[in-house]
Structures are given as C-alpha cells and as structure tokens.
Amino acid sequence: MTRISFLFFVGLAISLNAQGTLTGFTPETSQKQLQLEAAFEAQLNPENLDLWMQKMAAEPHWVGTEYGRKNAEWLKKQFTAWGYDTKIETYHILFPYPKRRSVRMTEPTPYTAKLTAVPVAGDPYTGQGDALLPSYNAFSTDGDVTADLVFVNYGIPEDYETLEKLGIDVKGKIVIAKYQGSWRGIKPKLAAEKGAIGCLIYSDPKDDGYVRGDVYPKGPFKNKTGVQRGSVMDMPTYPGDVLTPGYAATKNAERLDRKEAPTITKIPVLPISYEDALPLLTALEGPVVPKSWSGGLPITYHVGPGPAKVNLTLEFNWSIIPAHNVIATLKGSQFPDQWVMRGNHHDAWVHGANDPVSGMVALMEEARALGELAKNGNTPKRTVVYCAWDAEEPGLIGSTEWVEDHKQMLQQKVVAYINSDSNGRGFLNAGGSHSLQQMVGEVANVVKDPQTGVSVGQRKKALNLVKGRKPGFRLYALGSGSDYTPFIQHAGIASINLGYGGENAGGEYHTIYDTYPHYVRFKDPEFAYGVALANTAGRITMRMANADILPFAFAPWYETVNGYLENIVKSCTTLKKEVEQYNFLVSEHAFELAADPKKTFVRPKKKEVVPDLDFGPIQKELEALKKSIATLTAIDITILDKKQKRKLNGQLLLAEQALTSDQGLPRRPWYKHQIYAPGFYTGYGVKTLPGVREAIEEEHWDEARAQISVLAKTLQKFNAHIEKCTRVFK
C-alpha cells in the first residue's frame, strides 16, 4: 500500500472522530458515552482534593511507616464507601533505613557536611524534626571509604569520555556528580564500572536552585540546604524487591542473600545539598571544567582529582518491612472478566504533597465520581480496578510485586493500565502504547484547560508548534520511573502515563519541602489541574471500559514505530561517517597538532569501523504490518454482531503482549517489551526498539545483528496477531 493510501485511512479515522464518532464506539454509543462523561465531569469537586491532600500529606509516610499504613487503611475505607470491593494486599520487601551518614573533607581543609535541611518560616511541616526521613539514597551499599575527589559533571557516559580526553581516571577515587542529566541511579552505577569507590550527588543551583528563581520559602526552588532523596537501585536491570527478582515478595518467599542482590549499588552513594557541595568543589584543583560543565555556584569549577580528599561513611539498617497496596474493584456489568486498571502510588519520601499525593487525590475523586455513576445505574461495562501502590519511591516495588504475583491472570484480563503520579499547573503530558494515541488524543480534545478555556489537546498542540516539535497530538514513549513499568515492560499490557505540568517548576522534589503549603502556593493553588487530571484519566478509563470495540488504533502505532526504525538507520549512517572522519583525523595527527601544548593531551586511538547492518528483515515485517493494519482499520464496526465483537475484543486485549519476547532484553531478561524500555544507561529515559538501538550505541555489532533478528521475529508475531484480529470478520 502506498503512503498516500495508508494516510487516507488515518485521515478517515480523524474525520469520523470530528463528526462525533469516538474510536471504538458507534455513532449511537458515542453520543451516550459523551453524555455519561459530561455527567461524570459535573461531579468533580476540587475541594475534595484539597481536603484529602491535607489528610494524606500531614505526616511523613515512606514505606513501612505507621502513617503510611494508616493512609492505606483510610484509602480502603474511602473506596469501600464509594461502592468498590476493596482489599489491601501486603508484600514483604527489603528496605534500607540509614543508621549512619557522614561526609568529611580531610584535606586540604577539614569540613564536615551538615546533611540537614533547615525548617522554613510559614511551613510547619518542615519543622517536624526526627519524624522527617534523613536524606539518603536507598539501595546504596554500606561503606567507609576515603579518597581524592573528582568532579564528573552529571556522571553520564559522555562525561567519562570527556574525562578520558583530559587524562583523568576515577579509579580508586570518590566522584561528585550533579543531579539531572540522567536518572540518579546511573551515576553510581557508571562510577563503579569506571573503578570509583564512592559517589556523592548534589543539586546544583543552576539546575535546581537560585539560578532558576527564588528559593523556598520566598519562591518554589531548592534552597541551599535542600537535598533530593531517591532510590539508586539498578532498576534498568529489574525493578521491585531486590531479593525476589521476577517473583513476588510474599511473606515466605525464597530470598536472595543481600550480598548477591544485583540491583544494590556496588559503591556507597549519598546525596548532599549545594551548601555542603560548595566547600568540596571549591577545594578541587586540576583542569578547569569544559564550559558546559559549569554550574551556578560562585566558584571556578575544577575537575580534580584532589587535593580535596573525602571520607564517605554509610551504614544502613536492612529490614524486611510490609508494603501495602490498596486494590479497589468495581465489577463490570457486561464483561466482568475484562479489566481496566488505574493506579497511582501513595507512599512518599517525606510528606509527598506533590509526589505522589497530587496524583493520588485526583485518582480518588475520579473513582468517587465513577462510583456515583454506578450507584445511579451507570455501571461500566468492563470491570474497573483502582490501585493505590505502596513502595513506589524505593524502586516501583509495590506495583512490581503485585504484577509478578498476578502476572498470568493480568495477561488474560487487563485491557489497559492507566497511571498517574505527580501533577500540577500546565500542559497535559501523556505517554504510552501508541495503539492508544488516537483515543487519548480524542479525550484531550474535549477536556478543557482550566486557565485558557481551550481544550488541553489544543493547548498541547500549540506548545508543540512553538517548541518546533512534530505537529499534532502524540504520546511519548514510556521508559520507566513510575508504576506503569511492570505492566507494559514485563507483562506486555498496554499502558498510559498521565499528568499535567510545565508551569509548576520548583525544587521540592523528594525533599522535606514537598508539603501542602508549598503545593498550594506554587503547584496547583486551586486544584484545578487536579480536577483536569481526574477528568482526563476518568474519561480514558470510561472509554476503555465502555467501548463496543476496544479503542486501539494501530495506524499511529505503525507511523511511530516506523519512525523509530528510520531514526536508527539514519543514526547508523551518521555514525559510520563520523567514525571514518575521526579515524582519518587520528591518522593525520590532527587532534595532537590542534591541542594546546601546555595542557594535558591524551593521544586518541582509532575507533572500530562501523559495519553495514542489514535492517531488511525489520523493514520487511513493518511493510507487512502496514498492510494488515490498513485492513483492520478499514473495517466498519457497526456491522459486527455480538459474537464478532466479543472475539475481536478478546484478540485486541492480547495485542500488546505480541510485542514482547520471552527471552527479554540482553543482560536484563525481566524487560520483555521489544518496542519500549528504559535505557541501560539512562534509567528513566526511554530507548525505543531497545535491543537494536542499545547494541548499536554500545557498538556491539554481533549483538546488533542478533537483535535485528529478534525484533523482526517480534514484529512478525505482532503481524500474525493483527491478521488474526481481521479474521474475526470472515
């Protein structure tokens, strides 16, 4: 089929939607659905979100705390009152609590880090003293190490390439890295691979402090004592309980010895404030950093090593603690064995008003309104399951253990999983399975933006135009970082991640300043975007639950995935030319002759020649998929009888699983999805067509050829499944 005819089918779907027909619905059922959604929206009340946030964020409630347990019990009570069959499912997970934290500079000038954030005026929550969780990185290993300090910028692969050019080796050293640039867990992971024996991470004011705006309490940004907590578990290998990889952490589960757990860091790592980082960075000498490395502190940044020498001492209390997931079920009226799942986590590092309570209270209001509709005779056709996950912060643990515990059942029943997390004022940010892009875009076109009165879809499209992005409404690809991960990456269940933001910047993330007063001043003062999230996610949930035919549209999926492949092919061609040019410059001694003779110069070596890779097998399967998808898209669902609809829905439910491979990705078999995965060296950041892409990026050419074959076979399996969907009409 030509590109023109293929785009005709996409355009046909759009034109039909413009006439009032929703994806997956007939003209008649579309109108009924829109009326139902209007009734749902009319019930949403921002006052509920405000009151519930004050309740949930009143005290620190990280996993294992008494207040965390009380929140779970209170959530269960709320869902039950709204008509849901609700239970708490508890898992028993390993969690490290800090017993000893110490950072001391011993040379050239003694300095002992304070490691304490100060309370601020007007926010009594920040003054709760010992009740506040100390700042630390969960799943750092214990350690007592002393060494010269080296500044490694963000501590990502490109930074170590720069250090190599400067002739600086971190082996046997302690590194100090800035937050941002990648997920925090990549920094100690890569440092350990490079031979470092310890790692410090700080938030530079250029990224997360006074350079961006006024600091708390005057403004929303991080003050000099604020510290970002967070997990450094090696989640790109696998998330969840570190001692039960791939299976549930039930009370009597067989557990790994902690020393054998592969996702605990190999070196000690600790976050510090920029107040504590300043004396350490000031004491560094050695080369001045590249211009792009400089931060916002009032110093000239040097790389080191030394003469700053630092002692880092960490000791943790490693305990098995309970994690309480709240599972609330509203049984479907027609298809009770098809489930639409909706989740948000309830645990926090400290009070967590923004992360995660802002998303949790939106989910609650959504569930309450849906329950009211059901009490009035409008029960959803499919079963809706609302989930409040525990232990998300230390490593997506609550959701992962639950999915691992129920994986087979979920793969048979779950239509889609819809996730949210933090939320605030701004634009709709939506990612997920691209087979759901069309439906999510339709919802975005009917939800009103609280500030402008236009649809949130229209406002997001305008932002894309201003930013020079591709026009139209598009889902971003899911990597990791929230509770959708086990659903899509491990179980192969179509997933969506939703939230509003972009006009709610601040420095409270994972600090003691993520409180109710901070939220209502700087994030979403009127909870208008909390209501917008409830409205958006609620409509998506209801459409998945009530659609005549599950609202998957594979034409946008094909366009997106084909674009991923085109990007990889282009990058290979570019890389080949760059390596050829680089090797020519090495052979001509150009780098050496162009270098400053008074500065350290490390003579570069020639790089391995980039071979020609045959992407034909993937291109062939995508071409076949284009035809199969066009055939499926062209079917008129209004002519289907009940048996055909039931059969088609049964196949569509399983479609995402056809994009997984039982063997998983190289060196991390827990990740099954072959289209989306978190990057091995990006953490949260997504790698699309990950097996092929990462093999090329890491220049593992034999692996790249093998992964091309794996991906081609996966696409062949997916095409067979799409063809199976079309056969229900014959």
Image (spheres, helix red, strand yellow):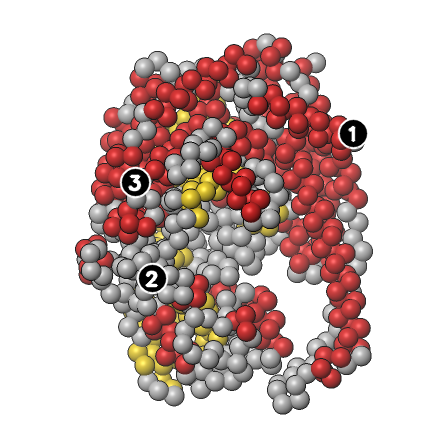
Asked which secondary structure carries label 1, the reply is loop
Identify the mark nearer the N-term, 3 or 2.
2
Q: Is residue 722 left or right of residue 160?
A: right
The residue singled out by tag 1 in the image is: 1
Asked if 39 appears above or below 284 in the picture, the reply is above
Q: Nearer the viewer, mark 3 or mark 1?
A: 3
Look at label 3 and name its amino acid: Glu
Nearest the eye: 204 or 158: 204
The answer, for residue 583, to whether it is visible in the render is yes
Look at label 1 and name its amino acid: Met
Nearest the eye: 623 or 441: 441
For the residues labelled 1 and 2, say whether their Cβ atoms are less than 8 Å apart. no
Q: Nearer the viewer, mark 1 or mark 2?
A: 2
Identify the mark nearer the N-term, 3 or 1.
1
Q: Is residue 624 left or right of residue 268?
A: right
- Which quadrant would the N terminus be assigned to in this image? top right
The residue singled out by tag 2 in the image is: 214
Distance between the alpha carbons at the discs numbered 3 and 1:
51 Å
**Crowding at mark 1 (Cα within 10 Å: few <14, some 14-19, many 20+):** few
The residue singled out by tag 3 in the image is: 526
